[in-house]
Structures are given as structure tokens and as C-alpha cells.
Image (tube, rainbow, N blue to C red):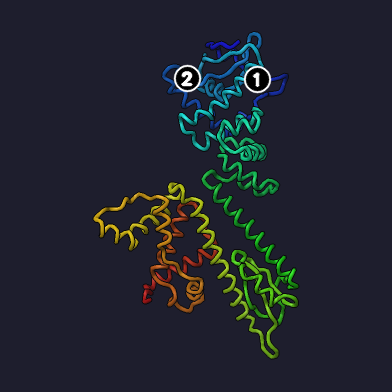
């Protein structure tokens, strides 16, 4: 039987079977204590029942006391406030109380139709259902998400421990993606909430780079190429392939296979060849050539990373406010928009949106790796437009303000672009 009763808080206890607490959540953890503090603050503003939760706890009547089946955090929040008595749904049958608890967990998420839940609230609702051992398919139906995501969130919740309670489902799924890699899981679990996506993207990029490098090395070995750690004495660089730009590697291997030597570098695979008979190998020139090849590859990789970062966020311009404002301004000042406004007399809406960000990005001028390398190596800025230099600096700085971490090649590119701007070299 179920009744709504006003109970004395001193008669209420956390649910236990023997000496075992049945609540899977550690209410003493830092995360849970923070949540309890938030609840206590909310309960102050309950105008109907001050100091009480708006959603009644579920209790099981066990002789002369009550055991908490659902609502232990609410219970501790009321104790924090000094609440003496509160309304609760009381059950005389433990099985009925457990069923009510499961239904309450589902109801929290189902109310998303009435009040849009934040990603954190949705995640907490799903995790509550998981802690109650509600089947994945049932959780998926209630939360209106794929059952596969529920399974991944369940595994990640176990891996992340109590810290999982304040994580979004996306973050939990990212943690599960790196299951088996303890270091990666620790980084995703322990980083600040605002940084987790950047940390995740960095790990994905590194994983892809390693996979691409492994594929290149395997292809070279299969063609009979010897893989070396350093350039052998008497050899010079012939061709470098970036880990992210190896489309022509196959055709190159057709004529440079057996007997060739390749050196694995940080950014790609450099094929080296013996110097001609009587040709002295200039070690300094060889080093500079390798540095140039490495920079070209790193420059390409950095451009690819920036595009991926923007592509991930363009659907929600609020996730990159500084970058969106910059690119939106670029879009509004591009020739096509100006021609339209002049022809129609209409003023184009100036708020950032995915379309304006895309147009703004495509309107940016970009320097080439060749031009930047010339600046860095002291050969002048003749091949870098000042407008391209300004666009590059502004874009990377705006992305930094939104949490993006530039790679070394990008930092060097920014330095080169600033030197172009300071020199005012815009002759082209």
C-alpha cells in the first residue's frame, strides 16, 4: 500500500540490508556533496513546503522507522537545511517501493518533453536508471537515445566512478571509446568539464595520426622499403609524405620500393636516397631540407585539425563564441554580401549562425606552407599577403579564446604572420 505522509526526519534512515548500504552512490564524495548543496539551496524556495523537495522521496516503512528507497541526496539536503519533517511517499511493501523508485527515475527523463533537460540533467537521469539496473533497451526508450549509447554510458560510468555523475552522456561515451587505455580514461575523467572535448579531440587526432603512420610504414615495408630511425650516412632526403596526406604514396612506391630507405619522422615518412658518386652530402643542408619537409607536413596537419575543430562546433555557434563572431564579421564584409545589400537596400541580419560562420571561414585568405617557411627561414615575406597573415592570426587567436590549443606549427605560423603584419609587406 502507498500513502503520502508527513514523516519526522529523525525516523528516516538510508536504505541498508544488514551492514550494506544499498545506494550505489557515495554521498560523501566531493561531487555528491556539491550536488546536495545545490539541492538544499533549491529547497529554500519551495513556497508550498519550504525546506522540502518538490519531488517527494520514496520510503519503505520498516517497523517503526523509514528506509530511503529513492531520495537520499534530498534527505541529506534537508538535514543540511535543518528541516524537521517532510512529505514522502511511503510503501509498506519493499517490492512496490523498488518499482516506484524505478518509475521515478524514468519519469525524471520523460519530463524532458515538458521541460528541456540540460545535457547534465539528462545524463544524471540515465545514470540513475543504470544504477537501478533498468535494462538498456528500456533506458534507451525512456531517454529516446540509441541503446548502444546506453551500453557505452553504463561501461563508462563504472570506469569513471563517482565523477561520472556530473558528466554529460557525450563525455561518458568518449571515455568508453578509449576503454582499455587507462591513461586516456584518466585524462578524460579528470580534466575540467569545459576542456574534455578538446582533450578528446586531441587524443582522437593522435590516434588517427598513429594509425595513418602505421599504415604508411606497413605499405612501405610491403613494397620492400627499409624503415630507419635516422637518415643513414651518405643519404639525402628525396620525398616526404605527411601522415594525413599520403594519397600519392602508393604510386610513389611503385617506382621506389625494394632497396629504398625511409625515415619515420614525427609528421610523416621521408624517403632518402644515396648521394651521387662523388657528391658530398651537406649535413646542414640535409637538416634544413628535413626541417622544411617536416614543417610542410605539420602545416598541413594543423590546417586539417582547425577544419575538424570548426566542423565539430559549427552547428552550435555558442560553443565557439569568439570564433563565431570573427567569422560572422568576415562573412558580413565579404563582397557577395555587400553586393547584395547594395542591390536590394536590405541590411543582412548580423547575428552569428552556422551559415555565416561557414561563409566567413571560406572567405578567409590563407598563406601557403611555402610562404610561411620562407618567412621563418629568413628569406623574406614576398609570398605571404598581409591580408592572409591577418586572417590567420585573428582566426587562431579567436579559436584559442574558445579553448583551442594551437600546435607548434601553428604557433610558428602565427609568429611568421605577425612579422609580415609588422613589416606591412602587402605589395602583392
Q: Residue furthest top?
A: 64
Within-10-Å neighbours for mark 1: few <14, some 14–19, many 20+? some
Q: Is residue 418 left or right of residue 251?
A: left
Q: Residue at x 72, y 75 (%)?
A: 257
Q: Is residue 387 left or right of residue 193?
A: left
Label 2 vs label 1: CA separation? 22 Å
Name the secondary structure under disc 2.
loop
> Residue 227: x, y in percent?
73, 71
Q: Quadrant of the N terminus?
A: top right
> Residue 296: x, y in percent?
55, 70
Q: Nearer the viewer, residue 147 or 34?
A: 147
Q: Residue at x 57, y 42 (%)?
A: 170
Mark 2 near mark 1, Cβ–Cβ under 8 Å? no
Res. 291 image quadrant: bottom right
Mark 2 vs 1, N-terminal side: 1
> Residue 322: x, y in percent?
41, 52
In this view, 129 is above or below 266: above
Q: Nearer the viewer, residue 340 or 408?
A: 340
Name the secondary structure under disc 1.
loop
Q: Residue furthest left?
A: 345
Q: Which mark is residue 103?
A: none
Q: Which mark is residue 15?
A: 1
Which residue, given by chain and number where applicable, does mark 2 sit on?
51
Q: Quadrant of the C terminus?
A: bottom left
Q: Residue at x 64, y 28 (%)?
A: 134
Q: Nearer the viewer, residue 1 or 146?
A: 146
Total marks shown come to 2
Q: Is residue 62 visible?
A: yes
In this view, 185 is above or below 224: above
> Residue 2: x, y in percent?
58, 12
Amino acid at each position: 500500500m502507498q500513502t503520502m505522509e508527513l514523516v519526522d526526519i529523525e525516523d528516516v534512515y538510508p536504505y541498508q540490508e544488514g551492514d550494506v548500504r544499498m545506494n550505489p552512490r557515495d554521498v560523501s564524495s566531493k561531487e555528491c556533496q556539491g550536488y546536495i548543496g545545490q539541492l538544499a539551496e533549491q529547497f529554500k524556495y519551495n513556497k508550498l513546503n519550504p525546506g522540502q523537495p518538490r519531488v517527494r522521496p520514496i520510503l519503505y516503512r520498516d517497523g517503526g522507522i523509514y528506509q530511503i528507497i529513492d531520495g537520499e541526496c534530498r534527505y541529506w539536503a534537508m538535514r543540511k537545511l535543518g528541516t524537521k519533517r517532510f512529505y514522502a511517499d511511503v510503501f509498506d511493501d519493499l517490492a512496490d517501493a523498488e518499482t516506484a523508485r524505478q518509475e521515478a527515475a524514468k519519469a525524471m527523463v520523460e519530463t524532458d518533453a515538458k521541460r528541456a533537460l540540460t545535457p547534465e540533467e539528462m545524463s544524471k537521469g540515465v545514470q540513475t536508471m543504470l544504477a537501478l539496473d533498468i535494462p538498456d533497451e528500456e533506458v534507451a526508450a525512456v531517454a529516446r537515445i540509441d541503446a548502444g549509447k546506453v551500453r557505452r554510458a553504463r561501461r563508462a560510468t563504472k570506469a569513471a566512478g563517482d565523477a561520472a555523475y556530473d558528466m554529460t552522456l557525450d563525455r561518458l561515451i568518449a571515455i568508453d571509446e578509449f576503454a582499455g587505455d587507462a591513461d586516456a580514461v584518466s585524462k578524460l575523467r579528470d580534466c575540467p568539464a569545459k576542456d574534455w572535448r578538446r582533450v578528446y579531440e586531441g587524443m582522437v587526432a593522435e590516434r588517427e595520426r598513429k594509425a595513418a603512420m602505421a599504415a604508411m610504414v606497413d605499405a612501405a615495408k610491403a613494397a620492400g622499403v627499409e624503415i630507419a630511425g635516422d637518415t643513414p650516412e651518405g643519404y639525402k632526403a628525396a620525398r616526404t609524405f605527411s601522415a594525413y596526406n599520403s594519397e600519392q604514396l602508393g604510386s610513389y612506391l611503385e617506382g621506389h620500393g625494394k632497396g629504398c630507405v625511409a625515415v619515420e619522422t614525427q609528421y610523416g615518412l621521408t624517403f632518402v636516397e644515396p648521394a651521387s658518386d662523388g657528391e658530398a652530402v651537406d649535413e646542414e643542408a640535409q637538416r634544413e631540407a628535413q626541417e622544411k619537409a617536416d614543417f610542410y607536413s605539420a602545416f598541413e596537419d594543423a590546417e586539417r585539425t582547425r577544419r575538424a575543430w570548426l566542423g565539430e562546433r559549427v552547428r552550435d555557434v555558442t560553443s565557439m563564441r569568439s570564433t563565431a563572431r570573427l567569422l560572422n564579421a568576415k562573412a558580413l564584409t565579404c563582397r557577395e554580401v555587400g553586393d547584395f545589400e547594395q542591390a536590394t537596400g536590405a541590411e543582412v541580419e548580423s547575428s552569428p549562425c552556422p551559415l555565416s560562420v561557414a561563409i566567413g571561414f571560406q572567405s578567409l585568405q590563407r598563406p601557403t606552407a611555402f610562404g610561411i617557411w620562407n618567412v621563418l627561414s629568413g628569406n623574406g615575406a614576398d609570398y605571404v599577403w598581409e591580408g592572409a597573415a591577418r586572417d590567420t592570426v585573428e582566426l587562431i587567436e579567436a579559436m584559442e579564446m574558445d579553448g583551442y590549443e594551437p600546435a607548434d606549427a601553428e604557433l610558428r605560423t602565427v609568429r611568421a604572420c605577425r612579422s609580415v603584419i609588422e613589416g606591412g609587406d602587402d605589395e602583392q
